Image (cartoon, rainbow, N blue to C red):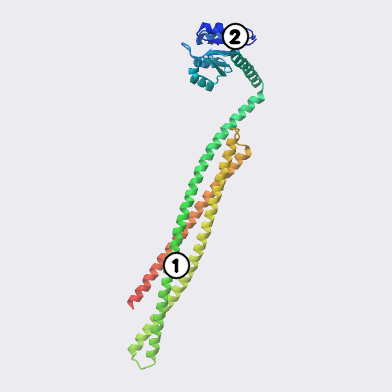
Amino acid sequence: MAQVLIVDDIEGVHEMLDLVFEDTGIELHHALSGEDAVNVFSANTIDLVLTDIEMPGMSGLELFSALKNVDERVVVVMMTAAESRDFVLKALRLGAYDYIEKPYDEDELIDVVQRGIVERQQRLHAATVDGNNPELIDEMERLREELNSFEEAKTENERLAAELEMVRNELTDRKTHDKALKQKLTELELKEGAMKTMENVMKERMNAFKSAEREQSGGGISVEAQAELQRLKEELEMKETELQSMETSIQERELFLQESEESLFEKGQRLQEIETELEQLREDLGKQGARSGASGGEGLSAEELSELENMRSQIKEKEEELVARERSLAKTERLIKAREQFLAQSETILFGDKEDE
């Protein structure tokens, strides 16, 4: 026979409920306070507790908490007036089985109590099955471990997402740097064009000196004039040699600038590829986290954990490759600066020669 504990501080409620449950085959126990109810519940095998919410001393909510400390599988139905619904909602959130409003509908009250008794039997049966099933206990322990692993993986995913964002920002900065470097190469090309123009002017001057030498060699000139012409001839030959050497150097610099530009273009393309690969890794990690969340807390499989570790290795490789690319770009920039200084010095030398003339 099912046993129900009635808890209310009004004696008339107990008398009325005795009549309601008279022919239901349910044995009733009574308590006029929360404190008495705890004692009665502890001393008997109670299937359901039917308690008022608002009582002097221990309230129905406080009684529910106390009964859960005695038996966490306790089934409690709250009795309440309409204005106490906020307390009922709180009780339901805490785990109360159901509630019924005063004044009672007798059929509804009996139905709620009978369903609560069935719920109590199901809870007891589930507890018995769980306690006698070592495999289920092991499975629950495994699920807890997988849940912990999932939380750790989630934290790691968040850290990797932050690292990917940082790498993406670095790639953006590198693009800006490459753009400035290309601008410097363009400026160098302009300077080299000016150098070629100056070279042509020098050649014209040399040709003019040679023509003057030929004209004066045809007539009678003094020994002093011949010596001066010889000196000018030697000086022009020296200038011509210097210009030829400079022309060769300019051609070498043109080739170097062309190779540098092609190298920068290739490096820019590779940086773009790295950025795309890192973005793909980030999407893969997002999908991995979504799959883990959709699994209901069952955690990551061995294959997924292996894939996550592989992603971390790939990110490390990309970071190392970025460092190598940055060093290469820095070296190229230093070489270009050295070539630029050489051109500036050559320009000074050539303009100085022109002013001397």
Instruction: Decide if residue 277 is on the left or right side of residue 335.
Output: right
Q: Residue at x 38, y 85 (%)?
A: 230
Q: Is residue 357 above or below residue 298?
A: below
SS type, badge 2:
helix
Characterize the local packing of mark 1: few (<14), some (14-19) or many (20 or more) Cα atoms within 10 angstroms: some
Instruction: Decide if residue 185 is on the left or right side of residue 151.
Output: left
Q: Position of residue 293 (x, y in %)?
A: 57, 36
Where is residue 105, by image quadrant? top right
Residue beneath disc 2: 20
Q: Position of residue 292 (x, y in %)?
A: 59, 37
Q: Position of residue 123 (x, y in %)?
A: 62, 19
Q: Of the residues under marks 1 and 2, which one precedes in the sequence?
A: 2
Q: Which mark is residue 189?
A: 1
Which amino acid type is shown beneath numbered disc 1?
Glu
User: Where does the C terminus fall, quadrant-wise?
Assistant: bottom left
Which amino acid type is shown beneath numbered disc 2?
Val
**Is there any visible trace of residue 236 in the rendered image?**
no
User: Where does the N terminus fall, quadrant-wise?
Assistant: top right
Q: Which mark is residue 221?
A: none
Mark 1 or 2, closer to the camera = 2
Q: Is residue 107 above or below residue 145?
A: above
Instruction: Decide if residue 301 is on the left or right side of residue 339.
Output: right
Q: Residue at x 56, y 42 (%)?
A: 286
Task: Kindly check if marks 1 and 2 are in contact, taking CB atoms under 8 A apart as contact.
Answer: no
**Is there any visible trace of residue 122 in the rendered image?**
yes
Residue found farthest to the bottom: 220
Q: Position of residue 343 (x, y in %)?
A: 41, 68
Q: Is residue 159 above or below residue 356?
A: above
Separation of disc 1 and disc 2 at Cα? 104 Å
* Observer-nearest of 157 and 342: 157
SS type, badge 1:
helix
